[in-house]
Image (cartoon, grey):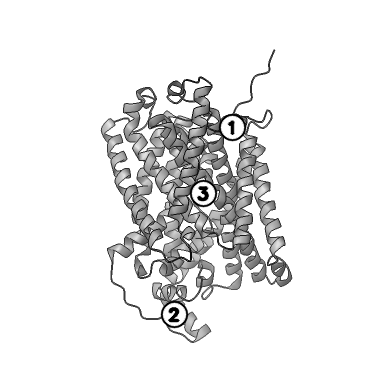
Amino acid sequence: MNSPKAQLTRNLSLLGLTATGICSMIGASIYVVPFMIQRNVPGIGPYVLPAFLFAAIPALFAALAYAILATAMPRAGGSYLYASRSLNPYLGFVASFSQWFGLSIVIGVIAYVIVPFFRDFFAALGWEDLAAQLEIGWIRVTISLGILWVFVWINIRGVKLYEKTLIPLMILMFGLGAVVIISGLSFDQSDFAKALLAKEGKSIPILENNFDWSIFLTASALLFSSFIGFDSIAQAGGEAKNPTKNLPKAIGLAIFGVGLFYILFSFAVYHAVPWEFVAAEAMNKDVTAAGLLSYVLPSSLGVLILFGAAIALLNDLPAMILSVSRLIFSWAEDGVFAKRFSSIHPVHHTPHRAILLSGAMATLGILGSHFAGDFFLGIDIMVTSMLVNFLLMSISLLFLPKRNAELASKITIFKSATVQKLIAYCGIVSLSSFLIIHTLKDLRAEVSAWYFHSTPVWLIVMAGASIFFVFRWKKLQKLGINTQERFSKLPD
């Protein structure tokens, strides 16, 4: 008698799901982006927080679409599954392929960027020799690869070890972030002005700022990247306990928790540091929360803030590895990817081959970051990919009742067709607008070669994914598989 085939097991709790979304969304960028945006979008001035709140609007509609679709299709694969069952398999695959490609490269980028954060942390502690060692190229690459593959191993070992790793990292990240929030709220701008005068003999620069809608919208499109990552909760749909209730709850908690944390964090720093100083400094050098608050804080707290930035970056990795590997697993289950990547480890009940392939792709991200010396292109590709994915989720919500009434009947939240259409249309309009703004910003950017624009590179990736899909689709047809039936139902 054949032994039963190993399957994914539903062991991921509500807290684990929420941590997956939060840790995919919050990285070290919170310590940099709200302040360096003064250079990236000159003229935003005192309107950083309003721009962030405006960026939350399309993210909220995308989150609602994900939450509704998750209750109808609680399986691994998330966005791929939703689009392939609501629209068609091609749209589901190519959009999720670009998502997988972008996120896998970014995983490598994160693993590579972590090392300088720990270097600065060790330097702040006075361990100059150890910090200097982390400047050596081969040592940096080796440590980056080690960090990456430790988290690959944790993912392979199962969701219980994954939760035991991720949840403490999340708690530590919030705890260290609270140091920034409390510190920023403990001082005001007059305290900062006195400290700046005492330390450097300078005064706060006087800058004028007039509100400009084009600048405001460009900044919002950039800050929208802060909300990318909650979809990782949907990718884990096949391993969630009580998925029809916990998946939408986790998405809601992640969006709310991250939004609140970002707002408090940014408000606290700008409460202590005048935006005029941030804008002037950002034009001349890279600025971070730790550097800005160092004028008013003792060095010990500065060290803690640096450590918090390193932890925030570190906790991205396990959640993002889980997310991209479940996309591969879901493709393989449907037959649009090699079937061997749908295999489940007989002991740990994880898609180990899909995880290993994702780790291999992230390794290329590490090596590319090291040898090319430029890793921002991968991040821009990821933002484009996620905007397209979020847009497709809104469209999927609109068309699911027409294209697949059986699955639409399983929706357990926001059951009203009118409410679903309202959420879908609002998502389509707002996300399309942000995608246009992001694309125009990319195409207008001055770069040394065309391939440093993310849009044409993303289109090339889409073309490659399309060719691959056609090849796999023809193979399914040759095997005599009823594709209409397969792509109208959920995997077992």
Question: Residue 316: in sight, yes or no?
Answer: no
Which circle's residue, 2 or 1, is located before the other in the chain? 2
Foreground: disc 1 or disc 3: 1
Number of callouts in the render?
3
The quadrant holding residue 125 is: bottom right
Q: What residue sits right under mark 3 in the picture?
A: 102
Characterize the local packing of mark 2: few (<14), some (14-19) or many (20 or more) Cα atoms within 10 angstroms: many
Q: Is residue 8 left or right of residue 403?
A: right
| Disc 1 residue type (three-letter) | Ala
Foreground: disc 3 or disc 2: 3
From what the image shows, is residue 113 above or below residue 427?
below
Q: Where is residue 386 shown, x and y percent of the image?
A: 44, 47
| Disc 2 residue type (three-letter) | Ala
Which circle's residue, 3 or 2, is located before the other in the chain? 3
Q: Where is residue 278 shown, x and y percent of the image?
A: 44, 73
Q: Tell me whether circle 1 and circle 3 mark residues in contact (CB < 8 Å).
A: no
Q: What residue sits right under mark 2 in the picture?
A: 193
Q: Is residue 395 left or right of residue 486?
A: left
Question: Residue 348: in sight, yes or no?
Answer: yes
Q: Residue furthest left?
A: 418
Q: What residue sits right under mark 1 in the picture?
A: 338
Measure the C-alpha gap from mark 1 to mark 3.
20 Å
Q: Residue at x 38, y 34 (%)?
A: 68
Q: Residue furthest bottom?
A: 201
Characterize the local packing of mark 3: few (<14), some (14-19) or many (20 or more) Cα atoms within 10 angstroms: many
Q: Residue at x 29, y 31 (%)?
A: 416
Q: Residue at x 47, y 25 (%)?
A: 490
At mark 1, the secondary structure is loop
At mark 3, the secondary structure is helix
